[in-house]
Image: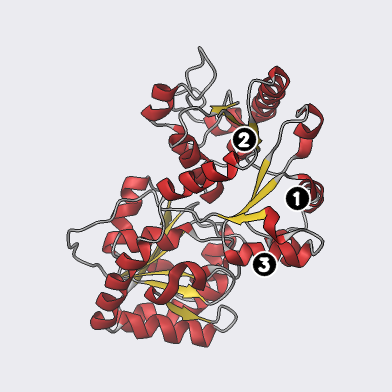
Amino acid sequence: MKVLYDHQIFNFARIGGVARYFTELLRYNPLAELSLKYSDTIYLQDQCFSKYKILPENHVYDTFLPGFNFKGKGFLRRSYSKLFKKNNLALSIHSLKKNKFDIFHPTYYEPYFLQHLKGKPFVLTVHDMIHELFPHFFLDDKDTIPYKSLLIPQADIIIAVSENTKKDILQFFPELKTEKIRVVYHGSSFQQINDSVKKERFILFTGGRALHKNFTAFAEAIAPLLAKHNFHLLCAGHPFTHEEKLLLENLNIADRAVCNYVSDKKLVELYSKATVFVFPSLYEGFGIPILEAFACNCPAILSNTSSLPEIGGNAAVYFDPNSIEDMRHQIERVLISPSLQEEMIQKGKEQLKLFSWKKCAEETMEVYKELL
């Protein structure tokens, strides 16, 4: 069975859960084909992709001007980004027109492919319904909602990444038959750590800080705790914006907060050493960082919304993300209790056993087989 994946998510996502998800599906399906000429996605920089020849023949995958670092490289890359996207799209259309695949699985929601499928089935993964539930957070995005509205009814099978996401899909598409949706959970790319790592006095926040990630409320919640208990805040992701720096200064915690991009190897180290990991998001379709924390023996304190309780189970402590007071209380409760931290770590190890990329890939393959 040959599955064709397109370029879409790899056009714009250097990191992130969706890009990691499709990278892992490719890793476990050596017969797959990825139509892609250029991408900065860090997860693709792996020997397995050369080994399985997933990328186009005679094309050596790499990032923009590999091995060269100079002032203005970022600007130059952005200047050429439209050309790269155009080339990627052209390759995907070419692969579709060749018609040498059994199933098509787009990596995002742009519906360009519908006119080129020639009757072949396609599977659509819906990662969340955040644009529909929180449209005021995405006023600049005019495409995602209409694209999904077009594709969801036409997909042969829909993969939802959680039961909560399935529920949200049916809320906005009540005419959709329930049996058309399959729930397939994500996994963690981090191996379970068995060795004990000495904890350090910092709270960990990972990933993007878009409005729905609730970073401002989180910062306000932990501000008094950092000085009170002598903790620091470490963020793994894009460096703080000017507005975020002002926020931290106004909260008097600028000298206790650090943020940088980190590699997966470094991220494992941060999870392992963090006293706690906090995920204050208002909405998540799945929540891969929860599993990453579990794998690294890091107590996870989570919002009690959307899919997070479904994924965290009884291994996490939860708070109301709309209540700064409750968030602060629950975080402090874990910070000051080594016994609770150890209990959460042990439960996290058990909860993690329910999820893996191998299981995700196998269940996705079963979905594909339904269409043959």
Q: Residue 42, image x and y in percent?
A: 46, 37
- Crowd rating for badge 1 (residues with CA inside 10 Å; few <14, some 14–19, many 20+): some
Q: Which mark is residue 167?
A: 3
- Crowd rating for badge 2 (residues with CA inside 10 Å; few <14, some 14–19, many 20+): many
**Which amino acid does the dot numbered 1 rest on?**
Ile
Q: Is residue 14 above or below residue 235?
A: above
Element type at mark 1: helix
Q: Residue 115: name its quadrant.
A: top right
Q: Residue at x 35, y 60 (%)?
A: 353
Mark 2 or mark 3: name the one nearer the start of the chain: 2
Q: Residue at x 61, y 55 (%)?
A: 182
> Where, quadrant-wise, is the C terminus in this rendering?
top right
Q: Which mark is residue 152?
A: 1
Q: CA distance from mark 1 to mark 2?
A: 22 Å
Q: Residue 316, image x and y in percent?
A: 40, 75
Q: Which residue is mark 2?
A: 11
Q: Residue at x 54, y 54 (%)?
A: 184
Q: Is residue 52 above or below residue 295?
A: above
Q: CA distance from mark 3 to mark 1?
A: 14 Å
Closer to us: mark 2 or mark 3? 3
